[in-house]
Image: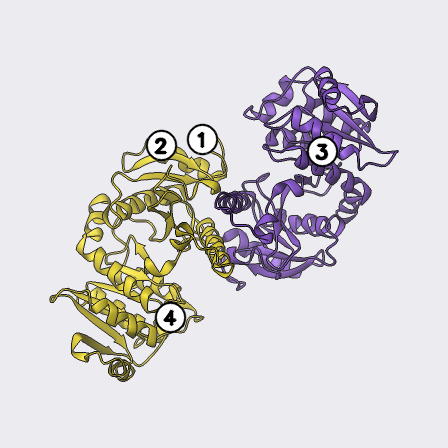
Chain colours: A yellow, B purple
């Protein structure tokens, strides 16, 4: 098993990425190889500084970097030797079984769709976020930004993707899937949620538990919350802000502590033909380590195969 | 000046409403009369129990009540002697200068649009919420649920409504109006925000400061945040949940304390021909008092006239 990591992606790359790779490597089995994609000389220097043998990794040297602010499609096209473009090429060819990066999210999405491609039957891939639950455990929110505008059949599919993620990776049996809405009743909502509700109500693809509201995000009433990527992105950034505020105000609490993205590693891009994880731009070594381990977990649990089966 | 209050609306009505009316009355000038609309006998009993003279109020006895869960349009039509229906009739006739209720929000919206009616030129009225700012002060979020689906020109108008509310009622000079979005750049967003941005950028109707994200809600970068009612409702309920969680966890903090809806009284329905405020269903006497005073403030600052002028 070869697990690819973009060491040039993220605000603190390449240092945070290489340090994270070291921590991830310590947990890997002998047949699991971490492939570091980026500036090899810089990586070797960082490994030496940290007294960690370069023999523990494979390296793929790249000469270009896609910046955090670059236009995704243009950057992927114009920088074929960027760490992200090379990572996706290797993933597509099968020389990697998973790829992750804390770099340009848009470029990761574009790379996913144009090289690895969506799974046949999946209309749009989705990005997910982890939601800590008040009474312990966690849930999943999707989409959090891959698709600003969605149609009802796309949201229905997000229910399938989120349900499989929750079950495979987070060991939640028969996940309760809910639709984010502005009222609990079936007749409440905007045009999108009104049209989506009957599709979800009648589906046998997952365990639909009805509408939830903003106030229900952290409740046990649901394990997976489905919404369009605009709403999900606003929710995610608002929730992150609350976490940041509690940190600044030094409110120590195990619930708020579970908002810390570092422990979850990143957001899988679901619905594509390979395990891909996008990390937070501000990823530190701990986050990078968990991003790598999440991508490994996606290989081991055969999540992609399960999704393919669901959409056959 | 006659200020109408529905004493039958809200989870703790009529008691919380009557107790709130007493507190509101204590702050009113001699020429400001509070008109209590609802079951007069019950009101008189409550006033007697609290040793507050009934001579301080005017009463309009009604025999019907619209429940919190009732279908708004049906309820308004089928219960012409409900406190909400009567309140709107009086407001339309001019025997009240403002009306407020902590009752059925949908019925308040329907009553607003069908009796008082929207101001000529206003496409859709909006409901607003107060947002505490991290560095002190407050901002406004709209729409928070009156319009689940919005078009770009409707959002543009919400900018006007929110700006006038911020300036008139909350004394924020030249309010900074922002568009809720999933990125700061002009080219980020869903179809709605992408189409709205150029309208706002080019308008002279208010001081547009660009896109904001979920994480910017509490920042000083903006005074008024505009979004569709679906997004706004999700934001509002999520933010309320965080407030409730900090309360439960006994995190005492002046920022979180400013989330307490009680001190703001309720949400004005903006864009209609009279001052109307809807209170939170769980309004206690303090909230009712502030709801009444907010509706009075809307009269005194001539907010409705200012909105009419803006849409001439």
Q: Chain of mark 4?
A: A
In the rendered view, would you say B239 is above or below A27? above
**In front of the other: label 4 or label 1?**
4
**In front of the other: label 4 or label 3?**
4
The reply to the same-chain question for discs 3 and 1 is no
Q: Residues within 10 Å of mark 4 (few under 14, many from 20)?
A: many
Instruction: Please give the name of the residue rendered at 73% of the width and 40% of the height, measured from the top-left corner.
Output: B294
Q: Chain of mark 2?
A: A
Instruction: Please give the name of the residue rendered at 15% of the width and 66% of the height, measured from the top-left corner.
Output: A32
Residue A266 seen from this side: no
In the rendered view, would you say A127 is above or below A34? above
In the rendered view, would you say B121 is above or below B54? below
**In front of the other: label 3 or label 1?**
1
Q: CA distance from mark 2 to mark 1?
A: 10 Å
| Location of residue A66 (image quadrant) | bottom left
Tag 1's secondary structure? Answer: loop
Left or right: B278 as drawn, with respect to A53: right
Q: CA distance from mark 2 to mark 4?
A: 40 Å
The reply to the same-chain question for discs 4 and 3 is no
**In front of the other: label 2 or label 4?**
4
CB-based contact (under 8 Å), mark 2 and mark 1? yes
| Location of residue B59 (image quadrant) | top right
């Amino acid at each position: 098993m070869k697990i690819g990591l973009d060491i040039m992606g993220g605000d603190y790359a390449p240092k945070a990425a290489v340090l994270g790779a070291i921590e991830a490597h310590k947990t890997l089995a002998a047949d699991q190889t971490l492939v570091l994609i980026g500036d090899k000389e810089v990586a070797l220097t960082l490994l030496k500084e940290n007294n960690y043998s370069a023999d523990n990794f494979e390296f793929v040297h790249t000469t270009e970097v896609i910046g955090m602010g670059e236009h995704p499609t243009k950057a992927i096209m114009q920088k074929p030797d960027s760490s992200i473009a090379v990572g996706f090429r290797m993933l597509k060819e099968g020389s990697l079984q998973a790829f992750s990066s804390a770099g340009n999210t848009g470029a990761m999405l574009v790379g996913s769709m144009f090289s690895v491609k969506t799974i046949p039957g999946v209309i749009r891939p989705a990005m997910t976020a982890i939601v800590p639950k008040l009474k312990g455990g966690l849930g999943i929110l999707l989409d959090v930004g891959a698709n600003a505008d969605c149609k009802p059949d796309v949201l229905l599919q997000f229910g399938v993707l989120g349900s499989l993620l929750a079950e495979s990776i987070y060991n939640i049996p028969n996940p309760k899937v809910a639709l984010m809405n502005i009222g609990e009743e079936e007749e409440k909502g905007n045009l999108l949620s009104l049209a989506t509700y009957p599709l979800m109500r009648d589906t046998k693809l997952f365990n639909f538990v009805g509408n939830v509201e903003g106030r229900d995000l952290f409740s046990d009433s649901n394990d997976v919350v489905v919404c369009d990527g605009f709403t999900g992105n606003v929710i995610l950034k608002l929730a992150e802000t609350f976490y940041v505020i509690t940190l600044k105000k030094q409110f120590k609490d195990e619930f708020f502590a579970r908002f810390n993205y570092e422990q979850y590693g990143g957001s899988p891009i679901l619905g594509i033909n390979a395990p891909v994880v996008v990390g937070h731009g501000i990823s530190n070594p701990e986050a990078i380590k968990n991003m790598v381990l999440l991508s490994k977990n996606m290989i081991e649990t055969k999540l992609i195969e399960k999704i393919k089966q669901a959409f056959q």
